[in-house]
Amino acid sequence: MELLRFTTAGSVDDGKSTLIGRLLYDTKSIFEDQLEAVERESRARRYEQVNLALLTDGLRAEREQGITIDVAYRYFATTKRKFVIADTPGHVQYTRNMVTGASTANLALILVDARNGVVEQSRRHAVLSSLLHVPHLVLCVNKMDLVDYDQGRFEEIREDFESFCTRLDVEDLTAIPISALNGDNVVSRSQTMDWYDGPSLLHHLENLYIGSDRNLIDPRFPVQYVLRPQRAEFHDYRGYAGQVASGVFQVGDEVLALPSGLSSTIVAIDSLGQSVQEAFPPMSAAIRLADDLDISRGDMLCRVHNRPTAGQDLDAMVAWLAETPMRVGGKYVIKHTSRTGRALVGGLHYRLDVNSLHRDLEATTLGLNEIGRVSLRATVPLFYDEYRRNRTTGCFVLVEEATNNTVGAGMIVEKTG
């Protein structure tokens, strides 16, 4: 079954956790003991009805404050598709958590309270989704029950949000009026909003076409490990193991190994203990070549006439994830695909205000949750594509060497000048 990853985002108390709880509850994706525990907790807190948000707000601080702090991942499946949900926080100070949840998502659900309309955090999450090139956006206008299911209010919010998104790189946007608390238009169509002729949220998630989201044009295979079994019957086995980042690799293809520049032909592809004729993202596989080339972890296989950019100088949009500010001239460990090296921050072009899209050209540093365009120089050549073309080979993380903390998440952009 096909897997769809999606993230929820929005302002505080817009109902993200309640929406996920409703999806899990109405699709019968929770165990009886989980439901009983939530019912007990709801009674103990004297809620008028079962608080489905408790299914995802797992931290004690989250339950006490009634907010989401950490990224909570939940899994469920229907007869049509499997789903991984990343429930991300709405507070400004947890922007880095939203970046984490959206980095691998096919779709972002941006919730808006029908009473409040589009607010600063709604725009912030739309900008972040655009920067992270999440292919599909769904605007969920929640709490429609609190505005008497008014069509005019829904249309007003939809037009406001669509107008803002014209300034962003948004490829696909869908707006759905819902009530997560009552289940209107979440799993099934609502009878109270007969003016809405679109799909329910679950129907949209089940039937959204995501086949074109993956890059199947540019074959990229970062090598993670060289397989050399020690058993006698496999004495001549040499396989290069990893996960296909993009494109399609087939038996018989001529491939190029970077950084050596040597080429060979694929003679076999193994995956999950059996031989296959082709490998495509996000398959994990072991590729065997006709020639014994000097290939190790961090190298990359690609096509002879379709190569990634190889270089040590990068321009990237960097989201800063640490309390210690990024400094120009700072040195960090850079992890890109399966390759690791060190990188020097050469310059900060501008800091981006994700609320107004204003570029602060005078900025000299990036603080926690801030995003800016940065120049980096790595100590080793990296094999990359632009992030907008290939999310897997276009991203990297920066790590503080002394603490081993991940401090930055980068998205490679085209160099200018």
Image (tube, grey):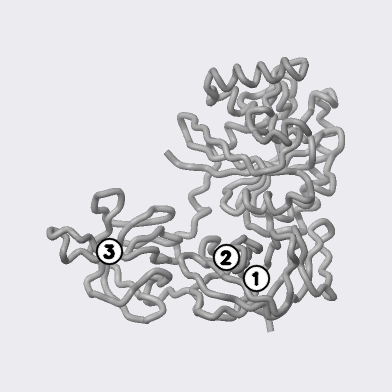
Tell me where residue 293 appears, x and y as whole percent.
28, 76
| Near-viewer residue (403 or 284) | 403
Calculate the distance from the C-alpha at mark 2 to the C-alpha at mark 3.
26 Å
Residue 5 in the image: above or below residue 262: above
Circle 3: is it few (<14), some (14-19), or many (20+) Cα within 10 Å?
A: many
Mark drawn on residue 316: 1
Among all residues in the image, which is located at the extreme bottom?
417
Circle 2: is it few (<14), some (14-19), or many (20+) Cα within 10 Å?
A: many
Specify the amino acid type for callout 2: Phe
| Near-viewer residue (3 or 197) | 3
| Near-viewer residue (148 or 84) | 84
Tell me where residue 77 appears, x and y as whole percent.
49, 32
Can see residue 411? no
Residue at x 78%, y 68% (from the top left corner): 351
Front label number (1 vs 3): 3
Q: Earlier in the sequence, mark 2 or mark 3?
A: 3
Can see residue 90? yes
Q: Secondary structure at mark 1?
A: strand
Q: Which residue is mark 2?
A: 396
Q: Which residue is mark 3?
A: 239
Specify the amino acid type for callout 3: Gly
Circle 1: is it few (<14), some (14-19), or many (20+) Cα within 10 Å?
A: many
Q: Are marks 2 and 1 in contact (CB under 8 Å)?
A: yes
Q: Secondary structure at mark 2?
A: strand
Residue at x 40%, y 76% (from the top left corner): 258
Q: Secondary structure at mark 3?
A: strand
Specify the amino acid type for callout 1: Ala
Q: Earlier in the sequence, mark 2 or mark 1?
A: 1
Q: Earlier in the sequence, mark 1 or mark 3?
A: 3
**Count of labels shown?**
3
